[in-house]
Image (spheres, helix red, strand yellow):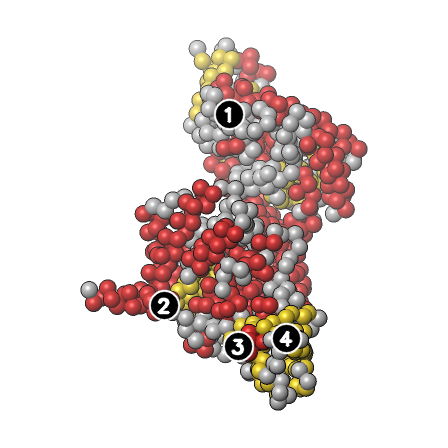
């Protein structure tokens, strides 16, 4: 009987958490991510997919990476029919306009492109039966590598702020949700440069190709707008009673003398790579509230008989005040880039990236040329349709296989009172 | 020393015009390979026009195989998996514009072009090409950057000499596009300070492309004898060369049915006059060397005569008519062939438009597609087959438009 109860508890802990009512994504959604970003980078599309597969899992959720660099709103709208429609997305996260003709004191984005094309874009996505649309504002540009004959980075960013405000209004009018990618990025840049130096860049060689650091901020804004609450998991330990409890997704396997063994099916978001590199997420998280808002993996310890304690998690140790542990400390932040989840997180993230690269290749090399196929072989419409359907079905099967990679991770927390 | 002479002899032989039937054979497929200048589908269509209409060898077809941004090695890379699919018999190649990298030529770039050309010729031989025509690169005509133009044409000329040398060494044919175009450009520049070949100066307009086509057609060995009509007014008799069938001849009016057309030259809207094919023939001997459609009239008992051809009339000295006048050169831009020539040209262009996606995009991607989605291998192959079928269908449609043209020549002695 005890075994059955334990098994049932483990099973409950492993299953994806039920979707919250206020979360804008639903089970089995296909989430389109299209932003002005390098489509072959491990960027926001991979970050968002990783979050919904590992951190706040939604059953059967799938992702489609349709990012493009220098992809203004007009260009995006014009490729909806070829690049997007065949996949049948149900949720769309779009961010276009960072390069939309800001060539003087007033942005061409504000005065022409966004008013002309954003509303039409929302309408076209609705016609594809996209249930939820989140319009993301453009991010901002970093002055480090920014070059323009007419304006400096500050003026460009002032214009992008105006683009953001215009997009917010048009999104509301079109019944779409809105995500402000601009503000958190603008706030984070000076903080990140203070940490890593003035040469720590955002946006690549021309400030228009967001690198992994910028893209994590973009992902953050979209995840917030989708209603993610950031409560990944909590481990509560009562040292005196030798007892521990975990929230759903965190199964307690044992608790004895301050050592807690846990099996987790929900992972904290892991920051990987070289912190000094813009192409890594490991250097940017201290510069914006990702961990506070979206990545709370808490340890709460009661019954500490000392003022301070050492917590060992995996092969890393940190010291905390007992009062902080009593209130709860965020392990995802305190052990960032060195958690027991990092290896498995990397494996899943790699698999997501490979899948999204394949999507990008199909879009770039096959779907985008719909009219060219008609010209190349007018009698082959049936073959083109058959192949298109097979690509989408193959993608769905491969997407489902990604969820299977999110295996429970066993890990141990050791709490030791310090003299 | 002996080998030097041999080398020189080979190089000279490769530049000599050969007879058409020595290079093109019935049912040949002529692949026209190059970079974005080829992908413009202008000179390649002129070549196809000429092959279909002017000096037709039965069943000969053309295939445009340009690839924008391509250096010489692009053709080597695409030869086994894309060009080979078409089983061409003849290939023309024109590279160098991208190999020169828009800079003065240095040893490194010259060496890369040399090795790339040798390797490409080798790859072409391996797939069984019977005739390979290595062309020197076309000229730059950057009208707003004369210093840059001079510098880069020096580079392109040097690359052209490397092409010539390799063609000789490899025993393949050579088309001296660069030097004939450079000479024409110099004549054009001398005619007017605003002379331009149009386009962006690298991708020139129709005039420049006719100059390129001229170089390749000459290298194919065409003799330019499209047709000759010989009229004996006194005897009420006329004769035509093959492809020019005399239907009737009475009182100076000759009715003819032609299956070989002269190459038609046009004025074109929206481009400078100097960028048209009509203007280009002032600076290259295209009509003299490749487009002789001659009327010879005997028995004119007057110093001059008026010749009416279709809706146009021109006057000639009787002595000129006696020795033969080139109707293709004098009845421009409108002659009885012009309308049908334009239809065939449009159909050839449609065929070459289809080739761009087929040869550049789909054939480059299809093996990768099959690898990424093996379950659809047959469907991808079927799509390729459909593409080939469509190519054949468009090629057939262009050829089918080359119908016999009936036209009349009226010769009236002038008092």
Q: Which residue is mark 2?
A: B14
Residue B389's place in the image compared with B358, above or below, is: below
Q: Which residue is mark 3?
A: B323
Mark 2 or mark 3, which is nearer to you?
3
| Residue A216 in view | yes
Mark 1–mark 2 CB contact (< 8 Å): no
Q: Which residue is mark 1?
A: A144
Q: CA distance from mark 2 to mark 4?
A: 44 Å
Mark 4–mark 3 CB contact (< 8 Å): no
Labels 2 and 4 within one chain: yes
Q: Earlier in the sequence, mark 2 or mark 3?
A: 2
**Circle 1 sits in a helix, a strand or a loop, which is it?**
loop
Labels 4 and 3 within one chain: yes
Q: CA distance from mark 2 to mark 3?
A: 33 Å
Q: Nearer the viewer, residue B70 or A224?
A: B70
Q: Nearer the viewer, residue B274 or B178?
A: B274
Residue B83's place in the image compared with A240, above or below, is: below
**Circle 4 sits in a helix, a strand or a loop, which is it?**
strand
Residue, far bottom:
B235
Q: Which residue is mark 4?
A: B305
Residue B109 location (% of width, % of height): 36, 48
Residue B117 location (% of width, % of height): 37, 58
Q: Name the residue at 43% across, 46% down.
A: B150
Query: Dot 1 falls on which chain?
Result: A
**Circle 3 sits in a helix, a strand or a loop, which is it?**
helix
């Amino acid at each position: 009987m005890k075994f059955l109860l334990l098994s049932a508890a483990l099973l409950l802990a492993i299953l994806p958490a039920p979707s919250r009512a206020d979360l804008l994504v639903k089970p089995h959604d296909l989430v389109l991510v299209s932003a002005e970003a390098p489509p072959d980078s491990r960027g926001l599309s991979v970050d968002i997919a990783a979050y919904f597969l590992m951190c706040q899992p939604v059953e059967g959720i799938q992702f489609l990476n349709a990012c493009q660099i220098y992809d203004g709103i007009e260009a995006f709208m014009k490729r909806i029919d070829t690049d997007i429609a065949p996949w049948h997305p149900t949720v769309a996260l779009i961010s276009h306009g960072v390069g939309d003709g800001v060539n003087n004191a007033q942005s061409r984005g504000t005065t022409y492109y966004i008013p002309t094309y954003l509303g039409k874009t929302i309408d076209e996505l609705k016609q594809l039966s996209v249930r939820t649309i989140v319009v993301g504002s453009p991010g901002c540009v970093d002055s480090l590598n920014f070059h323009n004959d007419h304006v400096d980075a500050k003026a460009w960013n002032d214009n992008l702020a105006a683009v953001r405000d215009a997009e917010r209004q048009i999104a509301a009018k079109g019944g779409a949700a809105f995500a402000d990618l601009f503000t958190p990025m603008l706030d984070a840049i000076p903080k990140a440069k203070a940490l890593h130096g003035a040469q720590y860049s955002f946006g690549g060689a021309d400030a228009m190709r967001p690198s992994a650091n910028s893209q994590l901020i973009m992902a953050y804004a979209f995840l917030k707008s989708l209603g993610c609450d950031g409560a990944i998991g909590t481990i509560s330990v009562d040292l005196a009673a030798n007892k521990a409890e975990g929230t759903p997704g965190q199964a307690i396997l044992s608790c004895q003398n301050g050592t807690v063994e846990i099996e987790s099916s929900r992972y904290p978001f892991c920051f990987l790579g070289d912190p000094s590199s813009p192409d890594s997420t490991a250097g940017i998280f201290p510069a914006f509230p990702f961990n506070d808002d979206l990545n709370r993996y808490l340890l709460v310890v009661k019954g500490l008989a000392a003022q301070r304690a050492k917590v060992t998690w995996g092969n890393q140790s940190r010291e905390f005040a007992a009062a902080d542990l009593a209130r709860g400390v965020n392990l995802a932040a305190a052990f960032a880039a060195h958690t027991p989840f990092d290896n498995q997180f990397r494996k899943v993230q790699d698999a997501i990236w490979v899948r999204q690269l394949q999507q990008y290749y199909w879009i770039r090399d096959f779907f985008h040329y719909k009219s060219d196929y008609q010209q190349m072989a007018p009698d082959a419409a049936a073959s083109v349709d058959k192949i298109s359907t097979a690509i989408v079905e193959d993608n769905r099967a491969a997407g489902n296989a990604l969820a299977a990679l999110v295996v429970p991770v066993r890990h141990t927390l050791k709490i030791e009172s310090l003299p | 020393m002996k080998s030097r002479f041999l080398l020189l002899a080979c190089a000279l032989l490769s530049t000599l015009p050969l007879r058409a039937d020595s290079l093109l054979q019935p049912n040949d497929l002529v692949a026209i390979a190059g970079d974005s200048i080829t992908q413009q589908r202008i000179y390649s269509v002129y070549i196809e026009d000429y092959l279909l209409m002017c000096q037709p060898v039965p069943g000969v077809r053309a295939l445009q195989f340009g690839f924008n941004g391509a250096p010489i090695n692009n053709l080597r890379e695409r030869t086994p998996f894309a060009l080979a699919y078409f089983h061409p018999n003849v290939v023309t190649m024109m590279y160098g514009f991208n190999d020169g990298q828009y800079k003065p030529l240095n040893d490194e770039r010259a060496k890369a072009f040399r090795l790339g050309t040798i390797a490409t010729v080798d790859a072409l031989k391996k797939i069984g090409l019977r005739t390979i025509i290595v062309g020197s690169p076309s000229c730059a005509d950057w009208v707003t950057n004369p210093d840059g133009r001079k510098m880069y044409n020096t580079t392109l000329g040097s690359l052209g000499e490397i092409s010539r040398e390799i063609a000789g060494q490899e025993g393949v044919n050579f088309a001296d596009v660069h030097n004939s175009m450079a000479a024409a450009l110099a004549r054009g520049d001398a005619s007017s300070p605003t002379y331009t070949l149009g386009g962006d100066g690298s991708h020139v307009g129709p005039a420049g492309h006719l100059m390129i086509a001229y170089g390749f057609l000459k290298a194919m060995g065409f003799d330019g004898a499209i047709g000759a009509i010989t009229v004996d007014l006194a005897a009420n008799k006329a004769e035509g060369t093959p492809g020019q069938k005399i239907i009737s001849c009475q009182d100076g009016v000759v009715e003819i049915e032609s299956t070989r057309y002269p190459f038609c030259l046009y004025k074109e809207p929206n481009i400078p006059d100097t960028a048209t094919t009509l203007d280009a023939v002032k600076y290259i001997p295209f009509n003299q060397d490749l487009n002789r459609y001659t009327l010879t009239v005997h028995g004119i008992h007057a110093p001059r005569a008026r010749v009416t051809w279709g809706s146009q009339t021109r006057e000639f000295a009787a002595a000129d008519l006696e020795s033969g006048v080139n109707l293709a050169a004098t009845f421009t831009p409108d002659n009885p062939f012009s309308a049908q020539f334009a239809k065939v040209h449009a159909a050839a262009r449609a065929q070459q438009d289809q080739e761009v996606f087929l040869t550049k995009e789909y054939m480059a991607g299809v093996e990768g597609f099959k690898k990424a989605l093996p379950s659809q291998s047959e469907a991808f192959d079927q799509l390729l087959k459909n593409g080939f079928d469509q190519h054949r269908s468009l090629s057939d449609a262009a050829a089918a438009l080359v119908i016999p043209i009936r036209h009349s020549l009226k010769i009236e002695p002038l008092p």
